[in-house]
Image: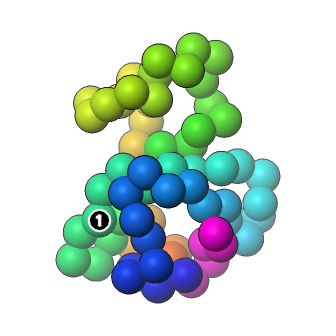
Amino acid sequence: MKLQDFKIGEEFTTNLGRFRWRCTDIGTRVITAIRVDDAKDKSWYNGPPYAVHESVFDENDQPGCNK
């Protein structure tokens, strides 16, 4: 995927495919996302701020992401 393919609130996977991620913010060169299969309590996904860790995907990580 490219930066313009990401939309806040939409989910994606990585090439490893083991986890689903939800885009939480889009910057000039990076996106942030939370892993949505991580929490036992679904309220942890309500935010911002989120009760789960937000990860950064830079321009080197983004091509390895899939819708």
Which is more toward the observer, 43 or 33?
43
Q: Is residue 35 above or below residue 5?
A: above
Count up the numbered dots.
1
Q: Residue at x 50, y 50 (%)?
A: 22
Q: What segment is highlighted magenta in the picture?
A: 63-67
In the figure, residue 46 lies in which quadrant? top left
Which quadrant does the N terminus fall into? bottom right
In the figure, residue 11 lies in which quadrant? bottom right
Which is more toward the observer, 5 or 65?
5
Q: Residue at x 23, y 69 (%)?
A: 27
Q: What x and y, as percent, mark residue 34?
A: 48, 44
Q: Residue at x 59, y 38 (%)?
A: 36
Q: Is residue 64 magenta?
A: yes
In the figure, residue 41 lies in which quadrant? top right
Q: What x and y, as percent, mark residue 42?
A: 55, 20
Q: What x and y, as percent, mark residue 9?
A: 43, 51
Q: Is residue 4 above or below residue 14?
A: below
Query: Does the image show residue 33?
Result: no
Q: Is residue 61 above or below residue 36?
A: below
Q: Residue at x 30, y 56 (%)?
A: 25
Amino acid residing under circle 1: Ile
Q: Is residue 20 magenta?
A: no
Callout 1: helix, strand or loop? strand
Query: What residue is shown with label 1?
Result: 26
- Disc 1 crowd rating (10 Å Cα; few below 14, some 14-19, many 20+) is some
